[in-house]
Every structure is written in structure tokens, then in C-alpha cells.
């Protein structure tokens, strides 16, 4: 990607691409799929495609609220198995392998401090976790996996994970992005906006009907 394209992305990262820049460079759109921004989306598309809308948000890494760990929980230094199993537990419909988590740790975007896991002190159960990456070429922090176990939701754990990752990114990144399913029943977009993310833009993943 040319320097001009990179500058265009940094000017409007939520509208310039559906994915973080380094992911956009790596991703190849399947032949049966189209990815269009909300400005280009038409209801007529639904005649031939199934639509899965995703949001993308931006944070300037300024004025980050101080993360406060909820009582009765503590940070835990989890391994690849712990993150893999927790993601599966929180998102049973997501296809992910342990090799994917290991690949994060071997990628140029890896930073040890951007892997966060919380345990409940009493039970020792993993309650929440988060993974962020950083594209040091352009200073983009990317919140990639944020999850809270179903029985621990609505207790401020997700907010703690997001704010902690943003706090850890602010000294090494210029901005951060995050994306997720718009129609998720847990309303992750609201969580991110409550943590200071702005510039919401909707992308439509259109898969051709069989």
C-alpha cells in the first residue's frame, strides 16, 4: 500500500477500510463476498446477498478514563490455551483455533502488555480477557478480542479490559480502532463508545445467496 493510501487511512480510519490497515493488506475477499461501506449499501443488495453489518470505531488515545479493576477480581498471566478456551466459551459460534492465538504472539503486531486476563479471586475462574495488537508502522492500536464470560457480564469487567488496553496503547500508538458485529445482542458498540470511541461507521459484509 502506498504512502498516500496510508495517509488517507490515518485521516479517516473508520471509513477508509473495514479492517485495521495491516489486516486489510492481508485479507483477500472471497469471490462470493462483497464488502461495502454504508454510503454504498443499497437495500437492493439484499435481493442477491445476505448482509452482516459491522461497526468500526476510532479512539484518539486522549482523555482515557482511569481503569478500575472491579472488586473480587485480579489480573492473571494466561497462556495461549487460556485465551483460546476463553474465546470459545464466550463466542461458541466463532471459528478460531489455538494456532490463531499463537500466531498473534508471533506476529509483528504483538505486544506482551496487550494481552489481558482477569480471574475471580474466590473461584479462580477466568472472567474476562482482551487482546490488542499494534501496527507500529502507522501507530494504529487494534482491539481485536474483548470477551467476558456470560456469568460475569454487566459487572464492569469489559469496560476495565477496554480502558486498560487503551491506557497501555497510548504511549506507543497514535490512535486505536475496534470493530464488531452491529447486531450483537450484547451491544459491544455501546461499551466501546462508553470508553471514548467515536467516528462510528458501518460496513456491510455481503455474502452471495446460494
Image (cartoon, rainbow, N blue to C red):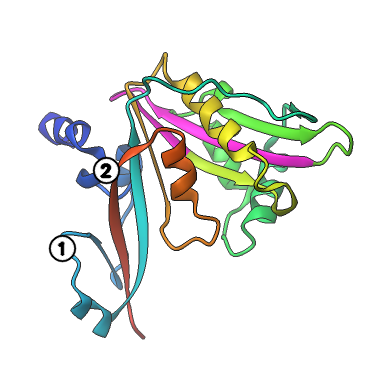
The quarter of the displayed image where residue 169 is located: top left
- Which residue is drawn at the image coordinates 21% and 31% (left, top)? 10
Range shown magenta: 126-143
Up/down of 168 relative to 189, above or below: above
In the image, residue 140 lies in the stretch drawn in magenta = yes
Q: Given contact means CB atoms under 8 Å apart, are the residues at marks 2 and 1 in contact?
A: no
Residue under circle 2? 14
Residue reaching furthest to the left: 4
Q: Is residue 14 above or below residue 206?
A: above
Q: Report the predominant secondary structure element of the magenta stretch.
A: strand
Does any portion of residue 29 appear in the rendered image? no
- The relative height of residue 74 versus residue 208 in the rendered view (above or below) is above
Residue nearest the observer in this picture, 125 or 3: 125
Residue 155 in the image: above or below residue 39: above
Residue on which the image places disc 1: 40
Q: Tag 1, which secondary structure? A: loop
Residue under the point 35% across and 52% down: 55
Report the quarter where the C terminus lies: bottom left
Rendered image quadrant of residue 6? top left
Neighbourhood count class around disc 2 (C-alpha, 10 Å): few under 14, some 14–19, many 20 upward: many
Amino acid at each position: 500500500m502506498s504512502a498516500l493510501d496510508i495517509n488517507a487511512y490515518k485521516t479517516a480510519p473508520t471509513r477508509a477500510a473495514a479492517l485495521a490497515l495491516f489486516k486489510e493488506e492481508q485479507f483477500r475477499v472471497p469471490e462470493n463476498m462483497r464488502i461495502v461501506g454504508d454510503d454504498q449499501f443499497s437495500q437492493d443488495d439484499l435481493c442477491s446477498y445476505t448482509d452482516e453489518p459491522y461497526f468500526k470505531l476510532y479512539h484518539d488515545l486522549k482523555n482515557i478514563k482511569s481503569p478500575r479493576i472491579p472488586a473480587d477480581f485480579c489480573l492473571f498471566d494466561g497462556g495461549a490455551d487460556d485465551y483460546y478456551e476463553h474465546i470459545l466459551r464466550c463466542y461458541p459460534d466463532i471459528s478460531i483455533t489455538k494456532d490463531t492465538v499463537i500466531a498473534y504472539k508471533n506476529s509483528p503486531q504483538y505486544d506482551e502488555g496487550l494481552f489481558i486476563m482477569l480471574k475471580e479471586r474466590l473461584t479462580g475462574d477466568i472472567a474476562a480477557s482482551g487482546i490488542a495488537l499494534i501496527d507500529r508502522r502507522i501507530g494504529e492500536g487494534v482491539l481485536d478480542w474483548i470477551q467476558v464470560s456470560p456469568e460475569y457480564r454487566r459487572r464492569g469487567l469489559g469496560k476495565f479490559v477496554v480502558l486498560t488496553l487503551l491506557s497501555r496503547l497510548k504511549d506507543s500508538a497514535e490512535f486505536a480502532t475496534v470493530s464488531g458485529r452491529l447486531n450483537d445482542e450484547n451491544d459491544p458498540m455501546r461499551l466501546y463508545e462508553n470508553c471514548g470511541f467515536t467516528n462510528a461507521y458501518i460496513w456491510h459484509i455481503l455474502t452471495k445467496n446460494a
